[in-house]
Image (spheres, grey):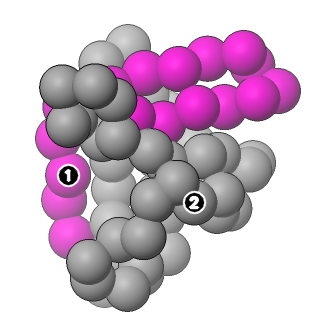
Amino acid sequence: MKVMLRKNCQDHLVVYVAKKDLEEEVVKEEITEAGKVFTLANGWELSIPLLEEPIKLPQTIEAKRLN
């Protein structure tokens, strides 16, 4: 699914999923061999392919929901 990454006014990373009209803050990031796993405030885990550091925001990317 396509998601948009951006920073909110408190400088926290936020994920927006347009198809679900969902916007949630990232509460945890894990680095894996395939990329990063973001855990959202609602409990969703999204697998994101490796991103260039520092992350250029806002950015739309392809993500996979793990749970």
Q: Is residue 66 magenta?
A: no
- Residue at image mark 2: 59
The front one of 3 and 67 is 3
Q: Nearer the viewer, mark 2 or mark 1?
A: 2
- Residue at image mark 1: 29
- Return the x and y of residue 62 as percentages of the image width and height: 68, 62
Q: How many marks?
A: 2
Query: Predominant secondary structure in magenta?
Result: strand
In 3D space, how far apart are the residues under numbered discs 2 and 1 (Cα atoms)?
17 Å
Which residue is located at x 21 percent, y 70 percent? 31
* 61 horizontally vs 44: left or right: right
Magenta extent = 14-31
* 64 horizontally vs 39: left or right: right
* 61 horizontally vs 31: left or right: right
Which residue is located at x 49 percent, y 75 percent? 49
Regarding residue 40, the answer to whether it shows in the image is no
Badge 2: residue crowd in 10 Å (few <14, some 14–19, many ≥20): few
- Return the x and y of residue 13 as percentages of the image width and height: 30, 41
